[in-house]
Amino acid sequence: MTKKVLITGANRGIGFETARQLAHQGWYVLLGVRNIQRGQTALAKLNAENLSNVELIHIDLNNLETLDEAVTEVNRHHPDLQVIVNNAGIAGDMNKGPLDFSAKELDNLMKVNVEGNFEMIKQFTPILAKNQGKIVCLTIPTIINNFFKPFGYLTSKSALNTLIKLIGNDYKQNHIPVEVFGVIPGGVTTDLNDHMSGWMMHSVEEGGQIIAAAVNDAHNHQGKIINRMGIVSLGAKHIWSKIKPTHKS
């Protein structure tokens, strides 16, 4: 039986790369996209790689009606869906301090990053429960430090992490056969962060590998936030890149 996965925000960045890698691995991939035109461009790129096991599905976390329609469509055409990857999210202004934010700006972040993820989990759980499926949510570490402290983004992701832990605990206690967990891929160079670079940043291909590995992981991570930043390997790669090869005369 073909394995099926739905990925939100799949027309670009980590979402697109995860979709590409899973499709190459034989998964049937539903590309959840907010903008259909951009989604069609992403679909064409995948088709150009001889990937026909992909299709578009309209999901806009700012418009929950599209989510209702997506659930109906999946129930009708893909009732054997096994995995949801909650990748879609927004960063807001990552340079603003706390008191520079307006309540509306913070509300926008919470609507997408928290309420949108909540609705995805809640509405797709009945389908996934029939298939003993899993929900993978992309997130970030929320320990406060002086190097990475975007107020709105961290606030919304902190709430998301709590939501994941509480829902995972509830599913475990009530024997709901759906695994819900968060994955921290670490910094990934995408347009979400204006293509931030540096030795601590993963390429988008590496980010896709991290999420694809979480999808394929047979271990149970119910209610956990698992860290896959790979700081040690990133550091080793950085050091190795600085070592110039020596040549014997």
Image: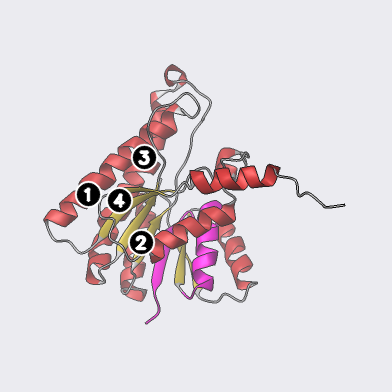
- Would you call the spot at circle 2 few (<14 residues within 10 Å), some (14-19), or many (20 or more)? some
Q: Looking at the image, is mark 2 or mark 4 nearer the viewer?
A: 4
**CB contact under 8 Å: marks 2 and 4:** no
Q: Position of residue 150 (x, y in %)?
A: 47, 29
- Distance, label 1 to label 2, CA atoms, is 24 Å
Q: Looking at the image, is mark 1 or mark 2 nearer the viewer?
A: 1
Span colored in magenta: 1-26
| Secondary structure type for disc 4 | helix
**CB contact under 8 Å: marks 4 and 1:** no
Nearer the N terminus, badge 4 or badge 1?
A: 4
- Would you call the spot at circle 1 few (<14 residues within 10 Å), some (14-19), or many (20 or more)? some
**CB contact under 8 Å: marks 3 and 2:** no
Count of marks placed on residues: 4
Q: Is residue 105 above or below residue 50?
A: above
Q: Which residue is mark 1?
A: 167
Residue 41 at least partly seen: yes
Residue 111's tag is 3
Q: Does residue 17 show up magenta in the picture? A: yes
Would you say 147 lies left or right of 137 here?
Answer: right
Would you say 128 lies left or right of 229 here?
Answer: left
- Distance, label 4 to label 1, CA atoms, is 12 Å
Q: Does residue 132 show up magenta in the picture? A: no
Q: Which residue is mark 2?
A: 69
Give the amino acid at mark 2.
Answer: Glu
Q: Position of residue 209 (x, y in %)?
A: 51, 59
Nearer the N terminus, badge 2 or badge 4?
A: 2
**CB contact under 8 Å: marks 1 and 2:** no
